[in-house]
Every structure is written in C-alpha cells, then in structure tokens.
Image (tube, helix red, strand yellow):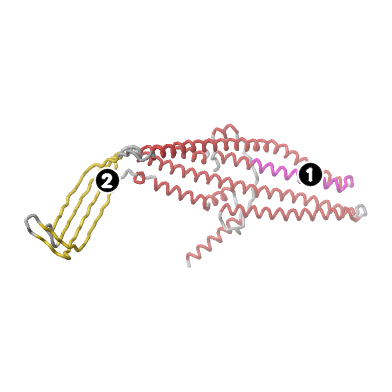
C-alpha cells in the first residue's frame, strides 16, 4: 500500500511541477535523466569497464581441476612367462584419476599487452559515445524548447494584430452609426477579425504539439502539461576560427580516434599470433588402478609436476599473415572514417556559422523593420479613424506588421538554432 501511495504522490508532484513554468535547465536535466538511449550507452560503458581486465586479455594464471572415476567389469585371461595362467570372468575393476593443473602464460609475442590496451581504448570509446548522445539530447531539447518560444512569439504577434483588427472594427461601427461607413467595410472588418481568431487557434495547436514533442524528449507522461515562458537570447560572441580549431573536442571524432587506436592494437594482436607461445605448467596428479583379478591388482601413483610448454606456429596456410593484412586495412579504414567525419563536421560548421552570422546581421535590420511596421500600423490606424486612410491601407499595414513580426521571430530562432548546433559540434553544450 505504501508503494502505491508513493507512486501516486510522485505522479501528482510531477504533474504539479510541469504545470508551473518549465525552465530550460530543468527540461535538459529531466531529458538526460530519463533518456533511454543514454541509459543503453551507459550500460555499454559498464560492460566495457568489466571487460577491461587483465584476465580477459589472458594475462592471469589458469587453474583447473579434473576427477575421473570409472567402474567396470572385465574378463581376465593372462598367461605369465612363469607358466601361471589367470582366467576369470566378471572381475570388478576401478580406475580413478584426479589432477590440479595451473598454467601461466610467459610469452606470446606481447599479445596480452596489445589486447589489454585494446580493451582500454574500447572503454574510452564507449564513454565518448555517451558524451555524443548527451550532446545530441541537450541540442534536441534546447531546439524544441526554443521552438515553443518561437511559436508563442507568433501567437503574441497574432494577438497584437487581433487588437488592431478589433479597433478597426470598432472604428467602422462608430462611423457607420453616424452614416460614414457602409456594410462592406463592416463585413470585411468582421471577416478579418474572425480569420485572425482562427489563425490563433491553429497556432495554439502547433504550440501544444511542440510541447508534446518536448515532453517526449524528456521521457515523461505524454499528457503532462508544461508551461514555457522564455525569450530567445542569442550568443553573439561565437567565432568561426574557434569552432574549427576546437572540432577535435567533438565526441564522435574522439570516438573515431579511439577506433583507430583499437584497430592498431588489433594489428599487434594478430601479428603476435605468428610468435611462439611459452607457458609454465604446475600441478598435482593422483592415479589409482585397482582390479579384482589379474597379475596387477593395484597400481597407484601421485605427486606434483612442474614444466614448460612451448608452442611454435610453423605453417597454417598463411592464415595469420592474411589476418594481419586485413587488420592493417581496417586500421586504414578507421583513419579514413575519421577524416570523413572531420571533413563533414568542418563543412557543417562553416555552413552553420554562415547561417548564424547572416541571421544575426538580418536580425538587427529586421528589428528596425519591425519597429517601423508598428509605427506605420499605428499611424495608418489613426488616419483611418480620421477617414484619411482606407480599409485596404489598414489591412496592408497590418499585413506588413505581421510579416515583420514573423520574420523577426524566425531570424531569432534561426540564430539560436545555429548557435546550438555550433556548440554541439565542439562538445560545449552544458
């Protein structure tokens, strides 16, 4: 009962938490905590950590024990050189043997050393895969979060346009009451206002769906209500030379570098197969052979042993040589894969920075355009009230204001999205 009470309290608390204003750090923290892909990669890190041990590489002694006990019935027929003849059917016999053997690898062309280094590189590589997924998750959450902010900014622009449309309708009604306006202006004003209300409803659906996408990234209940109140503030201090210089921090590039090192160790492991293998062996043997009939009724031996075993590969059809050639080609491919990644990331960084820089330049000009559009709309609305402007001029000024607002919001989001991508490329999203 206490368990279910705790679950209900947790769900209630979570619902209350997200019904309040959701801050970006909280959204990122929740997404990182609940991300299943990150959890899988963390499990892979744990597996790599377990595998990164000298025993997995084959550098620890191996101790084995074996026991064999056979009971059998034999027919004995023996003739000795003394003239004695032994003949018996169904005689019982027992053969018992046991041993404990320890084997220690002394030399195998340093294959154990190469294998241990490869396991270390695999563990480090798995950590970079986690870092890459963390960066991708943060970038996805930030982009979706600011997309919600963008969509809400659209709504605010629509609300301002609705206010203007309502004022225009009120002016037309006032003018019609004194015979200075016709029904055509009244109907058109009402239609424009209704259209804006419908546009706002459609925009609200877009916002709710964007919030659902963010909830999915956070991996919480899909019906969780969230409230986002924020503005888009762009970091203007990013320099392209710094981005290109720090691309080597990219987690995927670092994982590719570790893949090169892994491939190099595989070459050494494969090359070591062509070297002799020297082992030290020690143990203890116990053997007993007991028979109910025959010349030898009991034969028992026991004692320790110590020795060396040397295995020398002489010829196996060139298999080891071919395996080494394949490992060398795989190492070259790993280097090429890293070069391809670096090329693609460099190209993406340049293209993203170009978009970032151009968006910032346009953003400053668009802010001026938006201010002018507001002033023009207010001026035309005043002139319309004084019957110095037509309803068509008001609609044109209103449309110019909406377009300017949408463009300014889009440029702000584009600049922020480019900023997020640039920081993701250099592994600097926090």
Name the side, left or right, on which 225 lies relative to 7. Answer: right
Contact flag, marks 1 and 2 (Cβ < 8 Å): no
Q: Is residue 52 above or below residue 172?
A: above
Does the magenta stretch mainly form a helix, a strand or a loop?
helix
Nearest to viewer (mark 1 / mark 2):
2
Determine the residue positioned at 88% across, 45% down.
Answer: 389
- Pointer 2: what residue? 103
User: Which picture quadrant has residue 244?
Assistant: top right
Residue 219 x %, y %: 56, 54
Q: Work out which residue is located at the far left of the displayed protein and give it.
A: 82
- Pointer 1: what residue? 400
Determine the residue positioned at 17% across, 50% down.
Answer: 303
Distance between mark 1 and mark 2 Cα atoms = 85 Å
Q: Is residue 391 magenta?
A: yes
Residues drawn in magenta: 387-415
Determine the residue positioned at 48% across, 64% down.
Answer: 3
Name the side, left or right, on which 315 lies relative to 184. Answer: left
Asked whether the viewer can see residue 269, the reply is no
Name the side, left or right, on which 280 lies relative to 3. Answer: left
Please tell me which residue lies in front, 422 or 396: 422
Q: Earlier in the sequence, mark 1 or mark 2?
A: 2
Assign a secondary structure to mark 2: strand
User: Which picture quadrant has residue 118?
Assistant: top left
């Amino acid at each position: 009962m206490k368990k279910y009470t705790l679950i209900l309290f947790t769900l209630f608390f979570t619902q209350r938490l997200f019904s309040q204003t959701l801050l970006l750090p909280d959204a990122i923290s929740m997404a990182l905590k609940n991300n299943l892909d990150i959890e899988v990669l963390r499990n892979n890190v744990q597996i790599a950590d377990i595998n990164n041990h000298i025993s997995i590489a084959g550098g620890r002694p191996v101790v084995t024990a074996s026991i064999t006990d056979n009971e059998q019935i034999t027919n004995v027929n023996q003739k000795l050189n003394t003239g004695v003849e032994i003949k018996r059917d169904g005689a019982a016999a027992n053969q018992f043997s046991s041993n404990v053997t320890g084997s220690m690898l002394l030399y195998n062309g340093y294959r154990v050393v190469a294998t241990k280094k490869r396991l270390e590189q695999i563990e480090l590589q798995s950590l970079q895969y986690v870092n890459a997924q963390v960066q991708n998750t943060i970038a996805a959450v930030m982009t979706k979060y600011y997309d919600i902010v963008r969509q809400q900014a659209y709504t605010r622009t629509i609300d301002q346009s609705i206010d203007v449309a309502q004022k225009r309708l009120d002016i037309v009604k006032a003018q019609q009451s004194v015979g200075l306006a016709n029904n055509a202006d009244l109907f058109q004003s009402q239609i424009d206002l209704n259209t804006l209300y419908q546009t706002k409803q459609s925009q609200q659906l877009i916002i709710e769906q964007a919030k659902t996408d963010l909830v999915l990234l956070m991996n919480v209940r899909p019906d969780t209500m969230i409230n986002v109140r924020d503005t888009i503030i762009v970091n203007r201090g990013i320099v392209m030379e710094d981005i290109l210089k720090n691309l080597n921090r990219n987690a995927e590039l670092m994982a590719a570098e570790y893949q090169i090192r892994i491939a190099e160790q595989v070459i050494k492991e494969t090359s070591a197969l062509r070297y002799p293998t020297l082992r030290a062996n020690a143990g203890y043997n116990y053997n007993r052979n007991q028979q109910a009939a025959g010349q030898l009724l009991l034969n028992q031996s026991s004692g320790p042993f110590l020795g060396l075993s040397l295995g020398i590969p002489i010829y196996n059809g060139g298999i080891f040589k071919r395996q080494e050639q394949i490992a060398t080609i795989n190492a070259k491919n790993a280097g090429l894969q890293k070069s391809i990644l670096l090329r693609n990331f460099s190209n993406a960084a340049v293209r993203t920075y170009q978009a970032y820089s151009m968006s910032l330049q346009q953003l400053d000009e668009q802010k001026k355009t938006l201010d002018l559009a507001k002033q023009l709309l207010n001026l035309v609305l005043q002139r319309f009230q004084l019957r110095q402007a037509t309803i068509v001029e008001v609609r044109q000024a209103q449309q110019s204001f909406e377009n300017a607002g949408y463009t300014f919001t889009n440029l702000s989001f584009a600049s922020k999205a480019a900023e997020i991508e640039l920081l993701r490329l250099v592994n600097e999203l926090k």
